Amino acid sequence: TTLQSLQIKSLCRTPSDLPWLLCSLQLPQGDLDVLFSNIDDIVKVNSRFLHGLQETASREEDQVQLIGNLFLEFQEELEQVYKVYCASYDQALLLVDTYRKEPELQREIQGIIEAVVPQAGSSGLSFLLVIPLQRITKYPLLLQKILENTLPDASAYPVLQRATHALQDVNANINEYKRRKEVASKYTKVEQLTLRERLARINTHTLSKKTTRLSQLLKQEAGLVPRTEDKEFDDLEERFHWVSLCVKETKNNVAAYLDNLEAFLHFRPQECDLDVGGGPVVQYCSLTRDLQLQAFPEFKRRLEGLVWQPLCSLAKTLAGPQNLIKKRLDKLLDFERVEEKLLEVGSVSYEEEVARHTYQALNSMLVAELPQFNQLAMQWLRQILCTFVALQRDLAKQVLQRAEGSLAQLPHHHIPELAFRKLVEDALGQTSHQLHSFQKNFEKVLPPPTIQPLLPGAERQVQALLSRYGPGKLYQVTSNISGAGTLDLTLPRGQVVALLQNKDTKGNSSRWLVDTGGHRGYVPAGKLELYRVVPRDKELRGQAGPHEDSRHLTPEPTPVPVSSVPTMTQVVAVYPFLARSSHEVSLQAGQPVTVLEAQDKKGNPEWSLVEVDGQRGYVPSSFLARAPSPAPWGWSLPS
């Protein structure tokens, strides 16, 4: 017992002093966390344990029984702190090996250790790191030695037996926890592999495993073999998926918030010339400039650092458990197949036994640690949301503070809030009435809507639709339409169609059923406008009367086939045309053209003989339109 107390006392003195001494070597904090793990917790537990051992020395007649009870009392705490340290011990040794490859760093570390713990010798850091492992493994041996030297009929014997078994269980649980961590570290890594790398990993062994798992899964789906039910894990998995969904949605929302904030910061009305001098406008520009240069950029910086980055880190930590849950399903299929074979044959191979233990380790670790992870993730997310709210509250407070000085200089700052609201409502109502009157007067002199030019060769199709459906049913496509469904039409801009029904079979009024003259289908209603049939010159002259409104405006020029235009008429090219032979002439859109004959030599009106830049040749008549009238038209606001 005295030797044990001395060993624990040395443990409490040496490793706890090393982390801050090694900090003088400017080792990264991450390295110190790996090297010493939770050594502070181990020191605290062992300090209290040592104090309890020292108190037993004053009661020599009951000392053995008190030692046994003390071990039983500290059983759970010893297991909790030592299993964490032992699980990270192998990683700490790997880090020590990397230090040995740097001679100068190794000499500095060795010098510090020799000054603090001379008994470490040449082993140095590895000697200190192994002390906690030696301590927890020696406890069962010490208790067993005391038990062997205690009479079976002594009152302390049963207590020592329980304490010995308890410490043996502690060591067994630590080993099991360490094994689970090793399995988890193998499957937690999320590798970003290319397709070539994935294919390179495929071999007969992996194909055999995947085929066996797929066969097992298909048999379960078909009901040929029972599925392993684990209500506890299923509940934990469902909880984890809800946590993952919350984190994902929050991350998407914060990303959209940052994008909108960035767009808002690019909008700077105070830099525009508002053409309003003095008064509230100056105060507004000054306040807005101040917010744009200081308050909002600082808010964005804090938002990215205190909300966005922690949220990304939280989302990244979810990848490991997600991969473990996925691997657990694969290992569960292997486990079920091995269990079936064990029931049928009574024995399994070494590889199958390893697969069986791997599933048990994964499942046990997930069941034990997934609740803690879910709780920590929710606390993390809750803290992020609280920080987000606090940042917005701070921003509102800053904006109000900065605005107080500007508000005091506004002309209506002394008016109570209710009176100010009434004043604003009256001003808006009066302005709305003026705007409505202006709109009504504006519509009286507004030029008629322009009509898209017809597609080349579409004159006959329009005439056919007009004669069949009438002018009230004709609509023109305002922009190109790409049909996505089987009943949707793909139409170019400018095509004329006839309306059959102003809704689809489900009653959706945003999709109209139309007829193109050859096909029927649905098109978006927002891309159609009523087609205005332009009467010919004779019809216009016959309809014009002496009492025509003096404010009537001439419609915007629209393409009309040249067949209706007299010979030697000046027109313009609506579409470009590339000559294909010596009998034709090329055109550019908008180019002036002189029509010599409105038909070809056979009397076909679809081709016209024209002269362009001194060259004569034939062009399609539908590619030409009347030249705009030289008399300008316009509108003016009524008094």
Image (tube, rainbow, N blue to C red):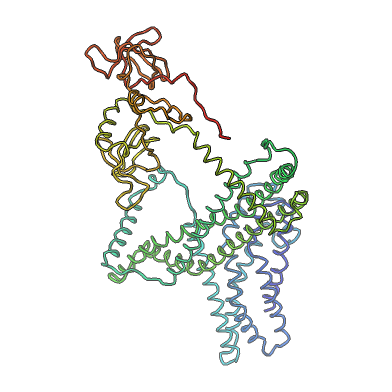
Task: Give x and y (percent) for residue 350.
Answer: 37, 63
Counting from the top left corner in percent of width and height, residue 464 is at 25, 32
At horizontal 47% and vertical 57% (from top left) the residue drawn is 187
Horizontal and vertical percent position of residue 532: 36, 33
> Relative to 437, is 560 on the left or the right?
left
Quadrant position of residue 313:
bottom right
- Indicate the quadrant containing the N terminus: top left, top right, bottom left or bottom right: bottom right
Residue at the front extreme?
546
Foreground of the two, 120 or 81: 81
Q: Is residue 594 above or below residue 31?
A: above
Q: Which residue: 73% across, 67% down? A: 13
Asked whether, in this view, residue 532 is left or right of residue 394, the answer is left
Task: Name the quadrant of the C terminus.
Answer: top right
- Tell me how many marks there are: 0
Q: Is residue 436 above or below residue 326?
A: above
Could you tell me if residue 123 is visible in this image?
no
Left or right for 134, reference 252: right
Q: Is residue 58 visible?
A: yes
| Residue in the foreground of this view, choosing between 548 and 290 | 548
Identify the residue at horizontal 24%, vertical 11% (top origin): 601
Q: Nearer the viewer, residue 165 or 296?
A: 296
Pick the residue in front: 403 or 452.
452
Which residue is farthest left?
602
On the image, which quarter does residue 437 sit in?
Answer: top right
- Answer with left or right where residue 416 lies relative to residue 64: right
- The picture places residue 635, in percent across and down from the top left corner, at 52, 30
Q: Is residue 121 above or below residue 81?
A: above
